Amino acid sequence: MKLLVYSHDAYGLGNIRRMLEICQYLLQTVPSLSILLLSGSPMLQGFRLPKRLDYIKLPCLNRGEEGKLASKYLKMDTEAMVKLRGDLVLTTALNFKPDLVLVDKKPYGLKDELKETINALKDDLPETKWVLLLRDILDHPDRTIAEWREQDNYQAIQHFYDQVLVVGSAEVFDVCQEYQFPPVITPKVKFCGYIRRPVGLRDRETLWQDYGIQKSDRRVLVTAGGGEDGYPLLHTYLEGLKLVPQDYPLKSFVVAGPEMPSEQRESLFQFAKSHPNVQMLEFTDDLMSYMEAVDAVIAMGGYNTFCEILSAQKPAIVVPRVRPSQEQLIRVSKMSELGVLTQILPEELTPEYLIQCLFHQLAHPGSFVASMKQLDLNALPRIANHILALLSFGITPLPEHPVDANIKCLCA
């Protein structure tokens, strides 16, 4: 069985990390599967790739802070870049002949670069199944509805896609209702829950030993995902450390992210040189090891980081990105209302307030963890089961983790 995966990668690491997690789970559970991944992420080679997965690296398109797409490295205008990427996708699909195509987020791809491939495969390989993967929240409903109508995304799902898999919960955010999906396509939508992240490669005690951390220390992880716009959060935290009493045993892991501008990253590393209780990392593909080894997390509100917080069941302070997309703001606000995390809006972020919230979470972790346990983290087995059912594989459904029975009460 052959699966072609298209990863929408125009900003940060979120999409490629999520798609790789899904690919890895599918490969672990379906021995006959091989996967070819299409991605423009410049960090793709930095991840551990599972066996039976290969990839084709597309030239990078980058979405700036205002949301405009442009070539990231090559001196090409956007239209020419999209044409080049679309031709690469088309050639790949026609030669690979996939049994199923899994598309991330945009039914027609970035700037419609998948349109020609969709039409060609529908003619040449009509038996190929098409599945669209959506994260829990795309953007504010007003903006998403307008964009989807303009781009004919509803019609694309109606005419070309067999299923839409949502890695989220309808009780928390119902994309069908919020984004006004037409009744003709809502039967194709399957809510899968959130993605449970696997445990880290190093256990807590090993990581503590590696960094000389004592059991009596309090430990914090600060991360801003890919890091392209993460400097304000990390800088504010480091400034806040000046307010912590010198005899308080606080140890900090601060992950800058590989896409943080070099001058900003250097200033953070320079600060850490004079603060032995701060461990700076540019990037790790094993963030779960660090998350499992700490007492609290400070982060931005991306989907993957949120799922890691849920999986590790760690108290978290989250500062959402609010532009150009309101995706993180909506997610973090919903989860704050459910008691899962503490939200700090960017305009509220100060060293004093951040450290105040951190000390509160370190003193009262239990209430946050209790709320987390009631959220559904069964996305991976459900995605696998839906894909296998589409391909008519007669296998026993993959098992799911138990979910607290109070989830409907929590999310109502």
Image (tube, rainbow, N blue to C red):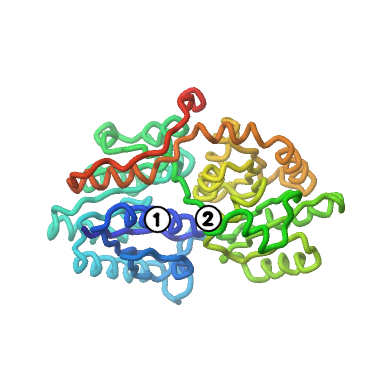
Decide which of 238, 363 is in the foreground and name it: 363
Q: Is residue 225 visible?
A: no
Label located before the other in sequence (1 or 2): 1
For this orientation, the residue located farthest to the right is 246
Depth check: give the residue in front, 354 or 349.
Answer: 354
**326 left or right of 129?**
right
Residue behind mark 1: 19
Q: Could you say whether the residue bearing mark 1 is in a helix, strand or loop?
A: helix
Label 2 residue SS: loop
Q: Residue at x 45, y 77 (%)?
A: 75
Residue under label 2, please give it: 200
The amino acid on which the numbered mark 2 sits, given as a three-letter code, is Gly
Q: Tell which of 331 and 82 is nearer to you.
A: 331
Q: In the displayed structure, does residue 11 sit left or right of residue 38? A: right
Q: Is residue 76 visible?
A: yes
What residue appears at the point 19 percent right and 47 percent down from the top-left corner?
393
- Residue displayed at 18% across by 54% down: 128
Residue 95 place in picture, x, y as percent? 19, 69
Percent x, y of residue 194: 44, 42
Closer mark to the observer between disc 1 and disc 2: 2
Relative to 342, residue 305 above or below:
below
Q: Marks 2 and 1: in contact by CB < 8 Å?
A: no
The residue at the point 47 percent across, 29 percent down is: 404
Residue 88 sits in quarter:
bottom left
Relative to 285, 208 lies left or right: right
Q: Position of residue 52 (x, y in %)?
A: 31, 65
Q: Could you say which disc has been placed on residue 406 in the image?
A: none
